[in-house]
Image (tube, rainbow, N blue to C red):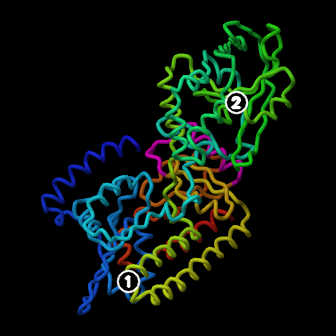
């Protein structure tokens, strides 16, 4: 996704030059506009939205004042948010509109340049993620989920039954401490990136990691063939053989979870640590990309109390700059953009839209307020129906053989989930491991169906069903509103009608 955005930046510059400056944008427009009746002496409001939910919310709040507005939906032809590219006509529409509404995630990287070209300097702009602020969630990896380009960042939540025993082979090889790179300043850029995305300054993060990374063990060599670990401390080696002693699951104050894997020395040098714990954010067999390690001689219980100090090791053949780049990727938060799939979010966002409309068109603010109040009641009522269905459900887990854009929805009602791909994933092919894991979960949880999002291709879901014991689960679709078209709108599709249909599907999935 990030590589695509860099390529698109070049495309965007060409678009501005050839489309807007050349004055030939109108012919290729891909957006729809709601028609407005002319009113003598009154200029219609120009409102541009990127996606269907925004468009529908605006129309609901305008109510019978919609004939005093030109409302455009840019993504009207079935293309989803993650692959949308604005036409020159789209850019022109944004340029002179009164109100522009967009999601604000990575997929909208083009917006900043578009707004720089705006001719209406009084334009009101609503960024959905900015409105929701700290309630915006980041993309998360779940057990069984296909890793993006083979790279996984660990699991923030999982069921106890997802955890598996692991062998020392997962950490086989030569490993170096990252502590020297922190001291040398090579990781300063990482601390600055964390400060941009977190709640500490770069200096505070550096102090935090100074404590966390600190160690005098510069190198660890692990030989899984003979189950040995060799620790190099101040140039002196201490080696011992180790036996696997199980794992422990940790529930952290932040709400996330973690697993440490235990090994105990059975024979070797006296200076080698007796007890060792590994944490690499993994919960099942798989080669570690890096790891945190806890070791000492006072027992596993003593190590389990250590939360502030976690020496960290990367492969010996990686340079400091390569380690820095890997850490920068981990430090970069990728926000889950699918905020509209929460009815609770919808209420907050509709309030923001109402405030903006009242500001740009104060003459009709009472009508907007009344329309919004009526619509918010409908959203709240449907929210209550969802909660009732979940409260009375036989099960509390859903499983998707597809991308999963519904994290906001499941979190609203305390549901658990498994999925083949993250919501913004570009992956389309699931590995044997992903298929096998998800099919096993269907059997273990006795799930009646496998869910998908809208679209004609449900091959992954079908393959999951074929790998279950019963092979008779239904394949049902939840609509994420990422492919809603102008034809759907003309045929009466609304945000509420889609969410009501989704509730019907959810009832089947949970019972």
In this view, the residue farthest toward the bottom is 40
Quarter of the image where the N terminus is located: top left
Can residue 462 be seen by looking at this rendering? no
Q: Secondary structure at mark 1?
A: loop
Secondary element under disc 2, as helix, strand or loop, is loop
Residue 278 is at least partly visible in this image: yes
Q: State the residue at coordinates (61%, 66%).
A: 506
Question: How many discs mark residues in the rendered view?
Answer: 2
Closer to the eye: label 1 or 2: 1
* Residue receiving disc 1: 361
Residue 509, by quadrant, is: bottom right
In the picture provided, is 238 more to the left or to the right than 191? right
Front-most of residues 434 and 200: 200
Judged by its main secondary structure, the magenta piece is: helix
Residue 92, percent across and down? 23, 65
- Report the side of 447 relative to 458 (left or right): right
Mark 1 vs mark 2, CA separation in Å = 56 Å
User: At which x and y percent is residue 97?
Assistant: 30, 72
Viewer-proximal residue among 51 and 181: 181
Task: Identify the mark at residue 310; answer none if there is no mark.
Answer: 2
Given residues 495 and 372, the one toward you in this image is: 372
Region of the chain picked out in magenta, as a range: 424-446
**Percent position (x, y) of residue 32?**
29, 72
Q: Are there few (<14), some (14-19), or many (20+) residues within 10 Å of tag 1?
A: few
Q: Earlier in the sequence, mark 1 or mark 2?
A: 2
Task: Residue at 36% x, 72% y: name it.
Answer: 99
Front residue of 311/71: it is 311
- Residue at the extreme front of the image, as rendered: 203
Identify the image quadrant of residue 392.
bottom right
């Amino acid at each position: 996704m990030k590589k695509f955005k860099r390529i698109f930046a070049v495309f965007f510059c060409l678009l501005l030059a050839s489309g807007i400056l050349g004055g030939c944008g109108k012919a290729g427009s891909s957006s729809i506009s709601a028609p407005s009746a002319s009113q003598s002496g009154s200029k219609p409001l120009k409102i541009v939205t990127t996606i269907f939910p925004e468009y529908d919310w605006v129309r609901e709040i305008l109510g019978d004042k919609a004939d005093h507005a030109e409302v455009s939906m840019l993504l009207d032809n079935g293309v989803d948010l993650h692959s949308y590219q604005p036409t020159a006509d789209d850019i022109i529409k944004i340029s002179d509109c009164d109100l522009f509404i967009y999601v604000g995630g990575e997929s909208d990287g083009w917006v900043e340049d578009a707004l720089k070209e705006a001719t209406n300097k009084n334009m009101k702009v609503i960024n959905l993620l900015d409105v929701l602020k700290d309630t915006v969630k980041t993309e998360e990896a779940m057990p069984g989920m296909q890793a993006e380009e083979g790279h996984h960042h660990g699991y923030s939540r999982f069921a106890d039954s997802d955890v598996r025993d692991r062998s020392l082979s997962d950490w086989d090889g030569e490993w170096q401490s990252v502590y020297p790179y922190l001291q040398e300043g090579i990781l300063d850029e990482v601390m600055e990136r964390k400060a941009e995305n977190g709640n500490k300054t770069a200096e505070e993060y550096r102090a935090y990691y100074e404590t966390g990374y600190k160690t005098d063990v510069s190198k660890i060599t692990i030989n899984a063939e003979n189950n040995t670990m060799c620790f190099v401390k101040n140039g002196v080696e201490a080696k011992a053989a180790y036996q696997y002693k199980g794992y422990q699951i940790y529930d952290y104050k932040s709400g996330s979870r973690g697993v440490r894997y235990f090994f105990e020395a059975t024979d070797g040098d006296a200076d080698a640590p007796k007890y060792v714990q590994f944490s690499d954010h993994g919960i099942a067999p798989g080669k570690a990309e890096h790891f945190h390690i806890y070791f000492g001689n006072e027992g596993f219980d003593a190590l389990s109390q250590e939360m502030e100090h976690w020496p960290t090791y990367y492969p010996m053949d990686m340079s400091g700059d390569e380690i820095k780049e890997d850490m920068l990727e981990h430090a970069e938060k990728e926000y889950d953009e699918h905020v509209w799939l929460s009815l609770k979010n919808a209420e907050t966002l509709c309030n923001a839209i109402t405030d903006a409309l009242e500001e740009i068109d104060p003459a009709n603010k009472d009508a907007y307020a009344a329309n919004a109040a009526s619509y918010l009641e409908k959203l709240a009522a449907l929210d209550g129906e969802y909660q009732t269905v979940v409260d009375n459900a036989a099960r509390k887990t859903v499983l998707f053989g597809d991308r999963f854009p519904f994290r906001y929805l499941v979190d609203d009602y305390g549901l658990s989930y498994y999925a083949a791909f993250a919501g913004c994933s570009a992956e389309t092919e699931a590995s044997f491991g992903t298929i096998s894991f998800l099919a096993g979960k269907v059997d273990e949880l006795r799930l009646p169906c496998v869910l998908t999002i809208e679209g004609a291709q449900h091959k992954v879901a079908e393959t999951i069903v074929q790998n279950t014991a019963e092979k008779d689960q239904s394949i049902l679709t939840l609509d994420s509103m990422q492919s809603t078209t102008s034809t759907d709108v003309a045929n009466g599709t609304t945000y509420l009608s889609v969410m009501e249909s989704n509730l019907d599907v959810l009832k089947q999935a949970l019972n």
